[in-house]
Amino acid sequence: MREKLLETEKKALAELKEIQDQASLERFRISYLGKKGVLTTIMKGLGRLDPAQRPVIGKLANEIKQRLTAHYEEALEKMKAGSAGEAASFDVTLPGREPVYGHLHPITQTIREVCHIFEKMGFRVVKGPNVELDYYNFEALNIPKDHPARDMQDTFYISENVVLRTHTSPMQVRVMEAQKPPVSVIAPGKVYRRDSDVSHTPMFHQVEGLLVDRDVTFGQLKGTLTAFVREMFGKGTALRFRPSFFPFTEPSAEVDIGCVICGGKGCRTCGQTGWIEILGSGMVDPEVYGFVDYDPEVYSGFAFGMGMERIAMLKYGIDDIQLFFKNDMRFLRQF
Ligand code: PHE
């Protein structure tokens, strides 16, 4: 019995030495010192001993239990101090590591800035689908199936009557279909064309504008766009309206601004003309009113559409449109 007790103590101490974590330490306590532990079990067997031996062995068993308890408590203290020590080694006075802040993409910033300018003039922002019916993208904009104007906007077809929209102009039709005049909306979003070079990407962004009411004039179109250009590019920016053609506006005009790169003297960017085209516009063609059930005798309006990449390139002096979509952080961080 004596041998068994001493053997148990030796084994317990050896085990205790190896213990590294609190959970194992607790398991140690239960298996040696607990109510159903090894020592308690041995002591319960005392009754079977020779009465003369009982006090001696009982005393030894108690001593061993006390010694093991002391060792166990010491180990527990050490472990607690250990984890507290770890916390203390962390210097709370060190400056924090600042997270890297991101920001909006330059195109998103440009879209928001443009929309904000028009919102201040009373336009409401609306959004529509990128995957569009041929009907809204072409047909209802007075561009029938065999119209040559379709060649200018070579399209990604999903199926015969479903396309990736080539411009934001379908929103003109969708908005007029859904509400009666007065209408004044601005529609930003992605558009798609089969184009790719230094000034074209297959996906780019446009902002469309539409205003329809009684007695809307071409003068109001000019005033609205002039106010926009002055706010976007600065008060002194030169602009001109150049006659143009779109199947859904009549008359139509393209707007050029004085080249921001050379100040109008003529350079590579403006093709030596001193002017850069920024948008298409015009008075809504009465044909379009026919598709949305507006009376062309009562209502008139204007529309315009502009490319956001072009606007951003001019505003920030960027000469390659592809940069916007390469996700090169050296480029993007500058905005
Ligand atoms: N949708 C035309 C384009 O993408 C631009 C435009 C919009 C022209 C509205 C006139 C009126 O080229």
Image (cartoon, grey):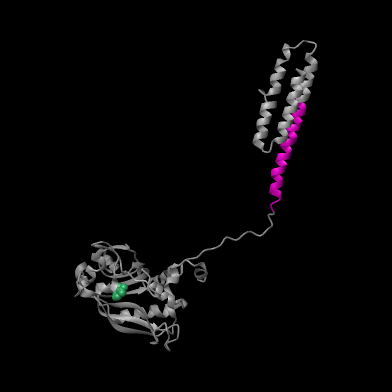
Residue 1 in the image, given as x and y percentages of width and height: 75, 17
Residue 175 in the image, given as x and y percentages of width and height: 28, 66
Q: Residue at x 64, y 35 (%)?
A: 23
Q: Is 174 located above or below residue 51 in the figure?
A: below
Q: Residue at x 26, y 67 (%)?
A: 137
Residue 28 shows in this picture: yes
The segment highlighted magenta reads 65-90
In this rendering, the count of numbered labels is: 0
Q: Nearer the viewer, residue 246 or 216?
A: 246
Q: Is 10 located above or below residue 204 in the figure?
A: above
Q: Nearer the viewer, residue 225 or 32?
A: 32
Q: Is residue 66 magenta?
A: yes
237 left or right of 152? Answer: right
Residue 33 shows in this picture: no
Q: Residue at x 75, y 24 (%)?
A: 7
- Taking the image in four quarters, ligand 1 sits in the one at bottom left
81 left or right of 208? Answer: right
Residue 16 in the image, given as x and y percentages of width and height: 72, 33
Q: Residue at x 66, y 60 (%)?
A: 95
Q: Quadrant of residue 126?
A: bottom left
Q: Nearer the viewer, residue 120 or 93?
A: 93
